[in-house]
Image (cartoon, helix red, strand yellow):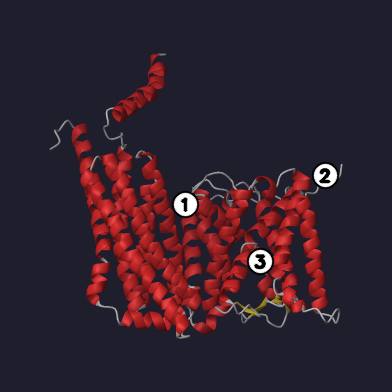
Amino acid sequence: MNGYRHRFPRYGTIGLIVLLLMETAIFCSQTEAFPEVSWWQITTVATPVCWWAYILIIDAWIYRRKGTSLLTARRESLVIQCILSIVFWSLFEAYNRVMPGWRYIHLPQDLSARLLGYAIAFATIMPGIFLTCEFLESYDCFERVRMPQVRWSQGALVGSVVIGAIFVLVPPFMPTSVRGYLWAFVWTGWFFLLEPFNYWRGMPSIYRDWQHGDPSRMLQLFAAGVVCGLLWEFWNMWAYTKWVYVFPLGQNVKYFQMPLVGFLGFLPFALEYFTMFHFVASFFTRDDKLGL
Amino acid sequence: MSDTIDAAAQPTARLDTLATREAAGRPPYIPVLDYVRLAQGFYFVFWGLLVTVLMEAQLLFLSELPLFAELFLGLGVLATVVGTWRLYQVHSLGDAWHSRIRATLALAGLMGYFCLFVYLWRRVPESTYLLVNVIAFGASGILYITAFDRAVAALAANLGRKDMALESRVFGTGNLGLLLLPFAGVIGYIAASAMVQKSDLLSELRFVLSRANLLVIIVLLLPFSLTLSLAWSCKDAVLRRLSNLDQADRGVDSP
């Protein structure tokens, strides 16, 4: 038994081919290979293409292991994830206008092409994280890890909401010179703010997991955040259209172009997206639409 | 044994009553708790919308405003969301009400989302991205009150209040004609003139706002204020029903 009980879907193979072709283009753009080809024009779309290919591959792999996956059985959930992914990331982009975090370079001049590119790229964030998490879960990663049970009082939950509200609201109001140092609060604030509501409303909740002494889902999300963070930076590094980090912290120690200290943000970011998704979903259904 | 039989018989008897009421064309049975939710919901929506619109107007027109005053916008939107949430919790008014109030709640959520952009835009007014989201906040607000009017029409039908149902339809149409269309027109004009004159949205918006006629603004906000009055009269109608129920429980004849 190797754990694979189903065929690898064709779309996964297509994703693999597309990813390899784009990787080849990225490699060629950094070397002198085939100088007559304008590689930069192809690597302009490297980020969205690589990420959509990654989604196809990892979803196919999940299908091969479990016999069910987001693209084969829960397509409406994929659409919702894509929409929410754009909506939530637009919010962080708004923070980015106020607090120096990152900026994009070599964007298309045409506004409609730029907006379409934003939408296609931002839509991959949430499915990318959640599929990676589901993939790790299919290997029972961290399933046996246990932690001391946390007893949640109403006071503690209300305190979490207050702390979260302070974390998400205060940084933009701080002096301009200080704002860039406060990204950690934005990356954790939404989790603290919304998680109690998921707990109260009976939605899948990290706080409830802690109550049961089960940190496996949190650790899977952390791991998914790290994996996606590594890939974001890896595919971003040599792309023509890309982002560069401008926050004033740890710029001298970097992984690819990401200051290493900023890498810590990917851990709570995955939790934050999980919490935000279920918070919005709770207004429409009490079902677990992610199944993580 | 008899207790078991009685307890099992109660839901059937209740269903019979509901079916009889519907067949007789009488308003459906509304539990007391739902009346309380309705009253609270309309109360919160009234004050929330009022504070939101006043603060949004000030934030657009005045560049210098203390942070304390700015916070009232968030409080207004929060009150609107909470009020709409209370209305959404009312399940006894039928499918039409529920689907409409659900759409209203979704729009209240959008208002809450875009409200954050207003605060961020105040910090960096020259950002076109943030300004576009502020415009989306305005659009979601207008759509919210239109959806709110539609939900009130469903409530009025349930309460048997034909006058209120008519008012909500008229005000809803007024919101579309006097608020949404001019809003879309102004935004279209600003975007077009920014493109033609190769300037930015903010300059064009400031130019339009500086030329805004007070009388025109009052006329434009008329359907909005009528919607607010509708929310208040809904709250009064619900409280009156609640009071009548209370008097009936105590054996007092209702007027």
Q: Position of residue B83 (x, y in %)?
A: 35, 54
Q: Is residue B13 above or below residue B255?
A: above
Q: Which residue is mark 1?
A: A154
Task: Report in which chain the residue with disc 1 lies.
Answer: A
**A39 or A31: nearer the viewer:** A39
Q: Position of residue B49 (x, y in %)?
A: 32, 61
For badge 1, the amino acid type reads Gln
A249 displayed left or right of A163:
right
Q: SS for tag 3?
A: helix
Mark 1 near mark 2, Cβ–Cβ under 8 Å? no
B172 displayed left or right of A123:
left
Labels 1 and 2 in the same subunit: yes
- Distance CA(mark 3)–CA(mark 2): 30 Å
Q: Is residue A108 visible?
A: yes
Q: Position of residue A153 (x, y in %)?
A: 49, 51
Q: SS for tag 1?
A: helix
The quadrant of the image that shows the C terminus of chain B is top left
Question: Which numbered circle lies on residue B87?
Answer: none
Q: Which residue is mark 2?
A: A3
Labels 3 and 2 in the same subunit: yes
Q: Nearer the viewer, mark 3 or mark 1?
A: 3
Question: Which numbered circle lies on residue A266?
Answer: 3
